[in-house]
Image (spheres, rainbow, N blue to C red):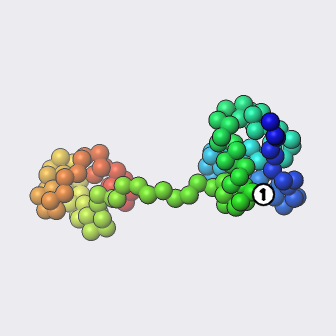
Amino acid sequence: MARRFVAPLTDSEQQTLTSAYHHGEKRALRRRAHAILLSDKGHTINQISEILQVRRDAVSRWLKQWEASGLDGLIDKPRSGRTPVLDADDHQRLQELVAEQPHQIRSLQARFQEETGKTVSTVTLRRALKKK
């Protein structure tokens, strides 16, 4: 079976990966940077997968992404999510309703639904109010 390693890292690549490993914003980026650093030190894909407790094909994919795109290949791409239930106008109206009745979430919920036609849970309302 052929062994696969990343191409030898330059000093700047090593510094970039070390920085991402120690100070990366997300755990996934830190783990991927660690995998590239381990590969540079001569660890096989099987050894890296054991060390990081991930599947072998994940490590192989990270190595390919590194070779193709560098650090950008290791960063998670933005994903689409659910569209927000409340828009900016809804947030503004919620603030006005809270000013009128600050401690009555159920009546706020009923009035909001009556005015906008949007059915929103009390949990969603609380979350929206905390954001503001």
For residue 127, side relative to residue 4 (left or right): left
- Closer to us: 115 or 29: 29
Indicate the quadrant where residue 56 lies: top right
Residue 119 percent across, percent down from the top left: 19, 52
Question: Which residue is located at x 68 percent, y 54 percent?
Answer: 65
The residue furthest left is 114
| Residue 92 visible at all | no
Question: Which residue is located at x 81 percent, y 58 percent?
Answer: 13
| Residue 124 visible at all | yes
Residue 100 percent across, percent down from the top left: 19, 60
Q: Secondary structure at mark 1?
A: helix
- Closer to us: 90 or 21: 21
Q: Please tell me how crowded label 1 is: few (under 14), some (14-19), or many (20+) other residues with Cα within 10 Å.
A: some
- Closer to us: 90 or 98: 90
Report which residue position mark 1 lands on.
16
For residue 4, side relative to residue 68 (left or right): right
Q: Quadrant of the N terminus?
A: top right
Residue 80 percent across, percent down from the top left: 44, 57
Residue 86 percent across, percent down from the top left: 29, 60
The amino acid marked with disc number 1 is Thr
